Image (cartoon, coloured by chain):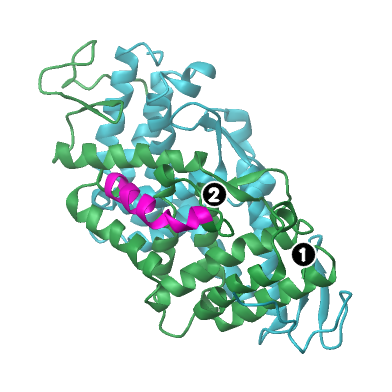
Chain colours: A cyan, B green
């Protein structure tokens, strides 16, 4: 077993030391001495710690077993996995790496803006302004080059102008349908959502992937037939 | 608003319909008619639903705010984000896409094998056998080509023989240190972990990334100096 050796460059106690940077960002105190570009590293750390909050943003839908509501971080993980598993149903030539990256960052703005339920038309109305302000703050924690890169992924996802963004959005819409379908209607019943409303989302899925769109339509039909979704 | 239109290919009610496949896998019932290769799609669906269980595998460490323990799915998401943010600290030429994919799948075996606390030497002893059996079952839900691909990512991560695997492992070890550091010792205090034990993990981080290893050593030293980690 390796014993603990105090690095000789560091003093014996206390936080502020010769050569150390004592920096406070977003409530976190760093003392960083060892990296080549300290300001850059501190910005990256601040972002990494800040996005931990995505684990506390609770969505409307539940886990597939219905045991509790899902949070945005685990949802984002599941979508990135779905991009890996269902990638062959994207249009030929779709850059699946970019789809995966978009899905990892697509909900970060909800740390400030909150989860907007897709069937809540009042909340949807000012969603864009709230999320844009959130993007300014959250991606703005990063070094400029990374802010541009990650914010670019989020904006591409939002604009749905590329095959990558449309496929990512399709998975984002399909995932809660799978959870609802396998929990006898789940949030559909709870929030009195109708098949007509769900079919609007199915059209978004179809825009990203005709195959997954057809499958989602079939899920809706089966849920209606089983009495788990109002016609 | 798009009205709900029942697809003409589907019957009016009930689950078993002309031309529909009624298939039950892992407790889930599918009725899939619309995809080109139904067996393949059903296998992909079964895997997608099964891995939802990763959201219920609870780790020892907490969120960065200490509010609750972290689950494996949100942990995996955070690591994939860290690969994106800290990628420049991997050795030159490291394939960061592969690092990200490894991090997405690296804990799936814990659905069956459970989370093994890195400082629990008894549990660590038979971890390999338990996790290998889990990999057989969970990756085995996928179509063969995807089983080989995703299991290959997991095995590469476990073997730590490539720069990608060593960097992925470095992030996997750094993340709980960040959470512990920012919760005044967190699980270090709770499970009476010492700085010497943490420094063994710091060496694993250094193998993947000298820069992140140096930073982790500094975190340990600062935690000891603050009295949040036993020397």
- Look at the picture and state if B142 lies above or below B201: above
- Which disc is residue B74 wearing? 2
Residue B103 location, x and y as percent?
Answer: 45, 61
- The mark lying in front, picked from 2 and 1, is 1
Q: Is mark 2 on a helix, strand or loop?
A: helix
- Crowding near pointer 1: few (<14 within 10 Å), some, many (20+)? many
- Identify which residue is drawn at 63% across, 33% down: A123
For residue A30, say whether it is visible: no
Q: Is mark 1 on a helix, strand or loop?
A: loop
- Crowding near pointer 2: few (<14 within 10 Å), some, many (20+)? many
Quadrant (top left, top right, bottom left, bottom right) of the C terminus of chain B? bottom right
Viewed as shown, does residue A133 lie left or right of A188? right
- Identify which residue is drawn at 79% across, 58% down: B184
Viewed as shown, does residue A208 lie left or right of A176? left
- Look at the picture and state if A124 lies above or below B104: above
Total numbered labels? 2
- Which disc is residue B229 wearing? 1
Is B155 a magenta residue?
A: no
- What's drawn in magenta, residue-wise? B122-138
Magenta residues: mostly which secondary structure?
A: helix
Near-viewer residue (B150 or B118) = B118
């Amino acid at each position: 077993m390796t014993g603990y050796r105090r690095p000789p460059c560091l003093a014996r106690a206390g936080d502020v030391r010769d050569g150390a940077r004592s920096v406070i960002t977003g409530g976190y105190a760093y003392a960083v001495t060892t990296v080549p570009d300290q300001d850059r590293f501190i910005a990256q750390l601040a972002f990494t710690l800040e996005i931990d909050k995505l684990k506390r943003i609770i969505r409307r839908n539940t886990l597939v077993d219905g045991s509790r509501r899902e949070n945005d971080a685990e949802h984002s993980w599941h979508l990135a996995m779905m991009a890996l598993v269902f990638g062959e149903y994207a249009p030929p030539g779709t850059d699946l790496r970019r789809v995966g990256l978009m899905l990892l960052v697509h909900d970060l703005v909800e740390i400030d803006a909150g989860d907007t339920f897709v069937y809540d038309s009042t909340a949807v109305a000012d969603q864009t302004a709230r999320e844009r302000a959130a993007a300014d703050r959250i991606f703005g924690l990063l070094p400029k080059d990374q802010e541009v890169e990650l914010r670019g992924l989020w904006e591409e996802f939002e604009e749905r102008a590329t095959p990558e963004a449309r496929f990512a959005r399709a998975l984002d819409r399909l995932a809660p349908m799978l959870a609802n379908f396998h929990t006898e209607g789940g949030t559909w019943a709870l929030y009195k959502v109708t098949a007509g409303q769900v079919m609007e989302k199915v059209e978004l899925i179809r825009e990203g992937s005709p195959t997954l769109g057809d499958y989602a339509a079939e899920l809706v039909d089966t849920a209606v037939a089983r009495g788990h979704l109002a016609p």
